[in-house]
Amino acid sequence: MTAFKSFEPRMHHSIQAQIKWNQTIMAEIIISLSLITLTTILSGITLQIFSNTRIYKKEPYLLNDGFTRIRVDFFLRTLAFALVCLTPLYLWVELVALVRLELWIFIVSFFVIPLFFASLPNLELQLHEQSKLVISKPLFSTKVQLHLKKPYQAFDRQTYQELLKLVSILPQYGIEQVKLTSPMFYEHNGQLRNFQTLEKLLMRHNATLQHVPAKWFDCILGKIGMRLSRSPQKKTGLEKINTNQWQTVTIDLVPASLPRGHHAK
């Protein structure tokens, strides 16, 4: 009986010591994970600051860079974010949690996921830094979508000249069709603008034009973008633009391999 009584305090002390040890380990885990999270956030912010590694709200690529090269560049940008965001976590798992990570985890994290994100979006390009039109092209497609660089930007003479320049250049990149979907093709009173002059200018580049009212799913993102825009031109733009009417203009180009006299079908 006496031996049992003497053992009871030792057992109680051992339990308390174990609890304190567990609490200390848990606190260290929380602190280390917090530091990793903070490091990851700061690293991501740092990459976003510099133009060479930025992903969100980056300037459009230049058309001279080519469609393939910009995909490679965006893959490298995504890879950079994966490296700075996941490497601290993986080091913690290996060195602190003592969990052995399989090779496929690194392959998926640092190759498959960056490759997926690099191929997913329609990356934007422009003819030059002062361009008024932006080009976007899905992966492996021979069609591009053009849109104004700013939501309430005027479709002026310079814009038309840039459009004609793109019509003459894009076939060299394997592009066969150009689409523009915009409310700018309507007057504010709902009357469709005249395309005769543009059609004549396009004929000089062996290109043909067709236009139809845009389907609702073709312009829903454009409508949302214009409504959410904070552009200083928004107030005056809404007075001149009827955002409820959108027109899709399709320009068929002659492939670069065809003779110049051959008209697009």
Image (spheres, rainbow, N blue to C red):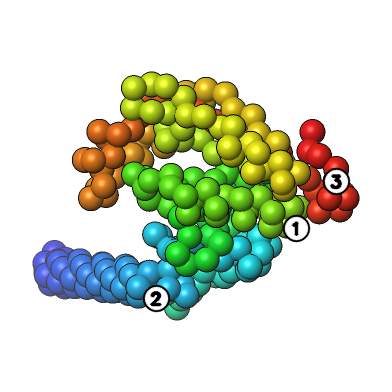
Q: Residue at x 78, y 38 (%)?
A: 264
Q: Position of residue 105 (x, y in %)?
A: 59, 62
Q: Quadrant of residue 35?
A: bottom left
Residue under circle 1?
Answer: 172
* 188 is higher (above) or lower (below) than 207: above
Q: Residue at x 55, y 53 (%)?
A: 161
Residue under circle 2?
Answer: 50
Of residues 55 and 132, the one nearer the viewer is: 132
Cα separation, mark 1 vs mark 2, equals: 32 Å
Q: Nearer the viewer, mark 1 or mark 2?
A: 1
Q: Residue at x 33, y 33 (%)?
A: 241
Residue 31 falls left or right of residue 182: left
Label 3: which secondary element: loop
- Crowdedness of circle 2 by 10 Å Cα count: few (<14), some, many (20+)? few
- Crowdedness of circle 3 by 10 Å Cα count: few (<14), some, many (20+)? few
Label 2: which secondary element: loop
Q: Position of residue 195 (x, y in %)?
A: 56, 32
Q: Residue at x 79, y 33 (%)?
A: 265
N-terminal of the pair, mark 3 or mark 2, is 2
Label drawn at residue 261: 3
Amino acid of disc 1: Gln
N-terminal of the pair, mark 1 or mark 2, is 2
Amino acid of disc 3: Gly
Of residues 154 and 228, the one nearer the viewer is: 154
* 261 is higher (above) or lower (below) than 212: below
Q: Nearer the viewer, mark 3 or mark 2?
A: 3
Residue 222 falls left or right of residue 230: right
- Crowdedness of circle 1 by 10 Å Cα count: few (<14), some, many (20+)? few
Cα separation, mark 3 vs mark 1, equals: 16 Å
Label 1: which secondary element: helix
Would residue 214 be seen by someone viewing this image from the given angle?
Answer: yes
